[in-house]
Amino acid sequence: MKVAVASGKGGTGKTMVSASLVSVWRSPVIAMDLDVEEPNLHLFLHPEIKGKRTANMEIPVADESRCSQCGKCAELCQFKAISLMGKIILTYQEMCHGCGGCIAVCPEGALSPGYRELGEILWGRTNYGKFLMGRLRVGEAMSPPLMRQTKIRLTEMTDLNGTDVIIDAPPGVSCPAVNAVMDSDVILLVSEPTPFGLYDMKLAHQAFSQLNKPMAAIINRAGLGTSEMAGYCKSSGLEILAEIPYDRGIAEAYAGGRIIADIDGEFRKLFTGLADKIKSIPEASGRRGVPNG
Amino acid sequence: MGKIAVSCEEPALDSRIDPRFGRAAGFLIVDPDTLEFSYVDNGSSQAMSRGAGIQAAENVFRSGAKIVLTGYVGPKAFQSLSAAGIQIGQNLENMTVRQAIEKFKAGDVDMASSPNRMGHGA
Ligand code: SF4
Ligand code: SF4
């Protein structure tokens, strides 16, 4: 089963939940950090990195001497990543989505494939099993292509029929967040019971509902703020699987790069209970182990 | 003298200058000698989440203008306009199109050699 740990906004404790779940999971599990813009799961799981590779995307490189200035490439590109200004063909690398359309449409063979580096994919082992992460290059704006390549690496690393995957997803509801949760079997929404937290969770709940997957909530810093969150979860059929209390020990563990399930027996019990509840959620049909997109 | 494209809010010589090049409502394409003008709508650029400046540069290029007067031009649009040999006068705000043209004719507009604003989509 693939479990995506998501949140409507950053800073809700999503990564600390992911890390703790990985640490208490009773069957083989891979920890996968798909929050490629700001990956930080490794800061808690301390993997030994065993390998890495660069993720690239194909972009056009223009040979002006062959260009007949027909303008077909610029007309095709909906991202304005290639533009014909008079006699000059201009490419804007960082705006290119790598679809290859311009290269295919050029009648003169003036465009050939080059590469833009998206970031890197790293993998290794932690005390709890295999580990995989994507990390976006500083200055790179497009996460989804790197996330797709990270998911491909996942299928190379393991036979997903015998192994579960816990995905630390990017916060929010934008394209990268949807990309991270879309082929999971269960989506967990980590939120704080404050008015802003509730607002962001509602957005995420509504956006991800369209994927028709089982979803459940985890309330972090329970006891802070309002009880409206419980009301919302109840009225919208979103089960609350765990409530993590507001506790000084958590802040200290977090700051020290430690896993909260390791703080004491109470916290461990909280997360083993959560893991058992997650495992009992019936999986979304038909998608098991197939990376999508 | 070549035609001048001025980013504007409305299709009139007394329209206020629109300081944003990429997201301007439109461009007044003005003959500086006769003050005859035509209007190029830039709505297609305004609607774009990214690449507005490049689209706007293409719109200006197609109009045949050789000079742009505006508030600020982003780095991509700057590259694009420069590639086409279009000269760029920036930092014009809080004035009408007519005033901008007069200022330019009086030689009071610095023609830029680099973009005056960073960031994408501009
Ligand atoms: S590869 Fe696709 S996105 Fe990139 S410049 Fe060509 S047409 Fe545009
Ligand atoms: S499609 Fe090829 S030949 Fe036509 S403008 Fe683009 S690069 Fe030049």
Image (spheres, rainbow, N blue to C red):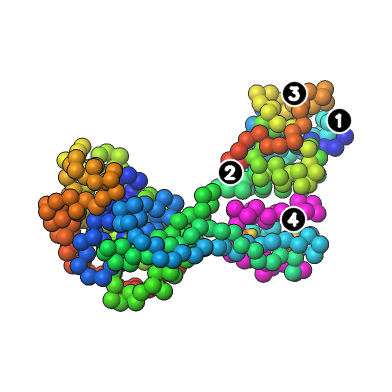
What residue appears at the point 53 percent right and 58 percent down from the top-left corner? A118
Q: Amino acid at mark 3?
A: Gln
Q: Are marks 1 and 3 in contact (CB under 8 Å)?
A: no
**How far apart are the alpha carbons under marks 2 and 1?**
36 Å
Q: Amino acid at mark 1?
A: Thr
**Residue marked by disc 1:** B34
Helix, strand or loop status at disc 1 = loop
> Are the residues under badges 1 and 3 in a single subunit?
yes
Instruction: Tell me residue B98's x, y (percent).
Output: 75, 26
Q: What is the chain letter for disc 3?
A: B
Mark 2 or 3: the one toward you: 2
Helix, strand or loop status at disc 3 = helix
Mark 1 or 4: the one toward you: 4
Relative to A247, does residue A150 appear above or below in the rendering?
Answer: below
**Residue marked by disc 4:** A89
Picture quadrant of ligand 1: bottom right
Mark 4 or 3: the one toward you: 4
**How far apart are the alpha carbons under marks 4 and 3?**
35 Å
What residue appears at the point 59 percent right and 44 percent down from the top-left corner? B121
Tag 1 or tag 2, which sits nearer the N-term? Answer: 1
Q: Is mark 3 within 8 Å of ligand 2?
A: no
Q: Which residues are drawn in magenta?
A: A80-108
Helix, strand or loop status at disc 2 = loop
**Residue marked by disc 2:** B120
What residue appears at the point 15 percent right and 55 percent down from the top-left corner? A268
Q: Is mark 4 within 8 Å of ligand 2?
A: yes
Mark 1, other Cα within 10 Å: few <14 / some 14–19 / many ≥20: few
Instruction: Tell me residue A62's x, y (percent).
Output: 72, 61
Instruction: Tell me residue A113's x, y (percent).
Output: 65, 66
